[in-house]
């Protein structure tokens, strides 16, 4: 047995970074996310395929709030930086719009056609674009909140860390993220990403400074692999060492794939934390 990272050989490390190993019904959950996203586009006012940058995948679907000057929640999808799209990522839009916010599902280019650095820059560009165009789109430009799941959580964190970090946001919610890319280099995920040691270090939020965010929510499902649990634990410790306000959540009954369904959902730890941070949770609901 050849150890490739920590105590793991290649097969064991591949399992650790295969979230489906702890979620046998993950295909059903993905289908459900896609169906809910299609329904959201049918039921809500939506501006699809809004271009925020020059790249062919730099588009977003924008769901306006029912009132001007509302906060905006931006969701960045996961998929190991090589799968999924904004098309399956609007499932939370109805709950945010009902709560009084606008919602955006952000798209970006995928590996192997796009480098990790270009993905980080796309997310950074999209967030900056939405902050600068709040008056034009109808939301408050200084009340843009971002969230992502899995690779999306990493991209949000990477976009808001390092010397080129920005824009500064009032809050972010990171679900089941990877914050140290070094083990990814030794796993099957790197077959598409092609990370070298320097690139992995450069785009690892665990290695950077504080995020450009006033507050951070970091959450994962209880049914995650050891490595995803370790990633969150060490990232939370790093944020606290940098004196950055952070809320650390482990959600019982949720896994890597269905945890995002709690976004905007009153009565869940993730949903309540995000809505409260956005000023959208009524006191009765909060109690």
Image (tube, grey):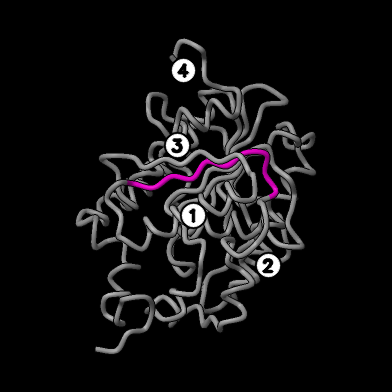
Counting from the top left corner in percent of width and height, residue 13 is at: 32, 74
* Residue 286's disc number: 4
> Quick one: SS at disc 1?
loop
Q: Residue at x 68, y 67 (%)?
A: 55
User: In whole angstroms, how far apart are the C-alphas of marks 1 and 4?
Assistant: 27 Å
From the viewer's side, name the closer residue of 81 and 19.
19
> Quick one: SS at disc 2?
loop
Q: Which tag, 1 or 3, sits closer to the chain's start?
A: 1
Counting from the top left corner in percent of width and height, residue 181 is at: 50, 70
From the viewer's side, name the closer residue of 252 and 244.
244
Residue 254, by quadrant, is top left
For disc 1, the neighbor class at 10 Å (few under 14, some 14 to 19, many from 20) is many
Q: Which tag, 2 or 1, sits closer to the chain's start?
A: 2
Q: Is residue 214 covered in magenta? A: yes
Tag 2 near tag 4, CB within 8 Å? no
Residue highlighted by disc 3: 263
Numbered-mark total: 4
Residue highlighted by disc 1: 77
**Foreground: disc 2 or disc 1:** 1
> Quick one: SS at disc 3?
loop
Residue 62 shows in this picture = no
User: In whole angstroms, how far apart are the C-alphas of marks 2 and 1?
Assistant: 17 Å
For disc 2, the neighbor class at 10 Å (few under 14, some 14 to 19, many from 20) is few
């Amino acid at each position: 047995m050849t150890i490739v990272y920590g105590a793991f050989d290649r097969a064991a490390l591949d399992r650790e970074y295969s979230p489906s190993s702890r979620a046998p019904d993950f295909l059903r959950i993905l289908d459900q996310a896609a169906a809910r996203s299609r329904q959201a586009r049918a039921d809500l006012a939506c501006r699809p395929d809004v271009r925020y940058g020059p790249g062919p995948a730099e588009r977003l679907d924008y769901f306006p709030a029912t009132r001007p000057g509302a906060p905006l929640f931006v969701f960045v999808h996961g998929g190991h930086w090589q799968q999924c799209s904004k098309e399956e990522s609007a499932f939370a839009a109805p709950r945010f719009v009902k709560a009084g916010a606008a919602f955006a599902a952000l798209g970006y280019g995928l590996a192997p056609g796009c480098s990790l650095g270009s993905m980080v820059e796309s997310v950074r560009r999209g967030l900056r674009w939405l902050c600068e165009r709040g008056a034009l789109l109808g939301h408050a430009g200084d009340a843009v909140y971002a969230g992502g799941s899995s690779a999306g959580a990493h991209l949000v964190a990477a976009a808001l860390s390092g010397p080129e970090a920005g824009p500064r946001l009032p809050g972010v919610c990171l679900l089941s993220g990877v914050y140290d890319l070094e083990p990814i280099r030794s796993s099957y995920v790197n077959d598409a990403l092609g990370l070298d040691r320097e690139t992995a270090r450069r785009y690892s939020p665990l290695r950077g400074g504080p995020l450009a965010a006033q507050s951070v929510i970091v959450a994962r499902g209880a049914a995650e692999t050891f490595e995803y649990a370790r990633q969150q634990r060490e990232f939370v410790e790093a944020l606290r060492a940098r004196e950055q306000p952070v809320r650390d959540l482990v959600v019982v009954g949720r896994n890597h794939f269905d945890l995002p369904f709690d976004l905007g959902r009153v009565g869940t730890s993730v949903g309540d934390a995000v809505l409260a941070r956005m000023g959208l949770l009524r006191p009765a609901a909060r109690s």
